[in-house]
Image: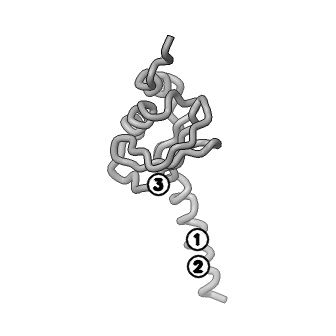
Amino acid sequence: MRIFLVAAALAAISAPAFAADQWTATPAQPVTKSDLIGELVSWDCTASGCAAQSSTDNADAMSECVGLARHVGPFTAFVGSNGPLDASRLARCNQAAPKPKS
């Protein structure tokens, strides 16, 4: 019983840390592209959004947002290890997205 309680306590502590490391991006338009590279991170995008597929340990959220926006267009949200980018940082990221052809 003691081992179970210790294992449960460790799982409770480590689960939020893992969840916080899950980087995601929500494109303004649905995208289905896989194996994209932002700056350092590999991304997989489905119709419901993009998720980091490789380590984000050495990555910068703003740089990754900009790098990924170059491939998929603007985002309505981008979440890195420190949480979501605020509106002004997200707007700067979206400036890197390709401009629609007129």
**x 53%, y 25%: residue:** 87
Callout 2 secondary element: helix
Residue 45 position, x and y percent, is 54, 45
| Residue lying at the far front of the rendered structure | 102
For label 2, the residue is 7
Who is closer to the viewer here, 32 or 70?
A: 32
Q: Give the amino acid at mark 3.
A: Gln
Callout 1 secondary element: helix
Residue 30 position, x and y percent, is 61, 35
Circles 1 and 2: CB atoms closer than 8 Å: yes
Q: Which mark is residue 11?
A: 1
Is residue 86 in sight in this rendering? yes
Residue 69 position, x and y percent, is 45, 32
- Image quadrant in which the N terminus is located: bottom right
For label 3, the residue is 53
Q: Give the amino acid at mark 1.
A: Ala
Q: Is residue 40 above or below residue 102?
A: below
Marks 3 and 1, Cα distance to the nearest angstrom?
22 Å
